[in-house]
Amino acid sequence: MWRRRRALLLRSPPSSSSTAASSCQHRRRHLLPSEEPLAVNRLARLFTSQAGSDCGNSQKPFIAFVLGGPGSGKGTQCTKIASDFGFAHLSAGDLLRHEIASGSEKGELILDTIKEGRIVPSEITVELIRKAMETSNANKVLIDGFPRCEENRIAFERIVGREPDVVVFFDCPEDEMVKRLLGRNQGRVDDNIETIKTRLKVFESLNIPVIDYYSSRGKVRKINATGTADEIFDAVHKLFSSLRF
Ligand SMILES: Nc1ncnc2c1ncn2[C@@H]1O[C@H](COP(=O)(O)OP(=O)(O)OP(=O)(O)O)[C@@H](O)[C@H]1O
Ligand SMILES: Nc1ccn([C@@H]2O[C@H](COP(=O)(O)O)[C@@H](O)[C@H]2O)c(=O)n1
Ligand SMILES: [Mg+2]
């Protein structure tokens, strides 16, 4: 399934004008050319001021990135992993939604981006994750829905100063993901068919390359995300029982 998606990608790479391809370059689409160096400098400052931070935990936490398409069941499975294996569950999407709800000045940009199904600038998301890791001070952390693109990945590795220990990939067919999202009924602004189409394109064009990257580094554990949540968790349970953390 994963290989088929990659083959499709190779056959028709997204054009530079495609909506999905420009998502990780959100600032580039919205900034005036004269503002661009400012954004780059801001990111560079963030990298240099916090590079190598251990997020407040003197023992390095075990980090699992949890990836998969929209509606593949990341959140559902993370809740079960957290409960059975004592992991802290940090969902990048939830942290961003919480930032919107807090009324912060970045909220409007985040809301617009989520409504469009695109990717929020990495400096915002990584900073929220870094703070949440610091606050939780956990020694085992699930980071759900992150990194969504290469920019996310690079920002995390530079700011937090390390790679994840493992990357869990929930592999689910698109029609099943669409069915689940349309049935989720939690009032999410991005659970409508137009935004879902963009989220699927963004997943294929920006997130699959991140999974490929970690796969080439031997970090990816792929889980078949079809079947009931309990059936899927059987496989997840086996995987986590085999990990050393
Ligand atoms: N195995 C499953 N079978 C059927 N429905 C499921 C299954 N796993 C989760 N769901 C339901 O599908 C919806 C999406 O699941 P969930 O929120 O866990 O996905 P997600 O990958 O976190 O999605 P998103 O990327 O949008 O946050 C929810 O309503 C959830 O209850
Ligand atoms: N690393 C991330 C994670 C999420 N987003 C934005 O939030 C939306 C919802 O995320 P879920 O994981 O809850 O589905 C997502 O579509 C993005 O707009 C992000 O930008 N970066
Ligand atoms: Mg989720």
Image (cartoon, rainbow, N blue to C red):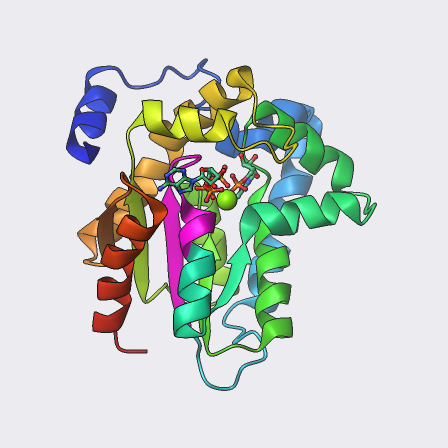
The correct choice, above or below, for 193 with respect to 6 in the image is above
Q: Quadrant of ligand 2?
A: top right
- Of 67 and 164, nearer the camera is 67
Outermost residue, bottom direction?
A: 58
Q: How many marks?
A: 0
Residue 13 in which image quadrant: top left
**Side (left or right) of 164 relative to 126:** left
Residue 126 in which image quadrant: bottom right
- Of 73 and 23, nearer the camera is 73
Q: Residue at x 76, y 40 (%)?
A: 107
Q: Residue at x 40, y 53 (%)?
A: 77
Q: Position of residue 111 (x, y in %)?
A: 70, 33
Quadrant where the image shows the N terminus? top left
- Residues in magenta? 62-77
User: Residue 73 in magenta?
Assistant: yes
Q: Position of residue 46 (x, y in %)?
A: 62, 58
Q: Position of residue 15 (x, y in %)?
A: 37, 15
Quadrant where the image shows the C terminus? bottom left
- Of 176 and 161, nearer the camera is 176
Q: Is residue 69 visible?
A: yes
- Of 203 and 45, nearer the camera is 203
**Side (left or right) of 82 relative to 191:** left
Q: Is residue 124 visible?
A: no
Q: Residue at x 25, y 58 (%)?
A: 234
Residue 56 in which image quadrant: bottom right
Q: Position of residue 10 (x, y in %)?
A: 20, 22
The correct choice, above or below, for 81 with respect to 214 in the image is below
User: Residue 159 in magenta?
Assistant: no
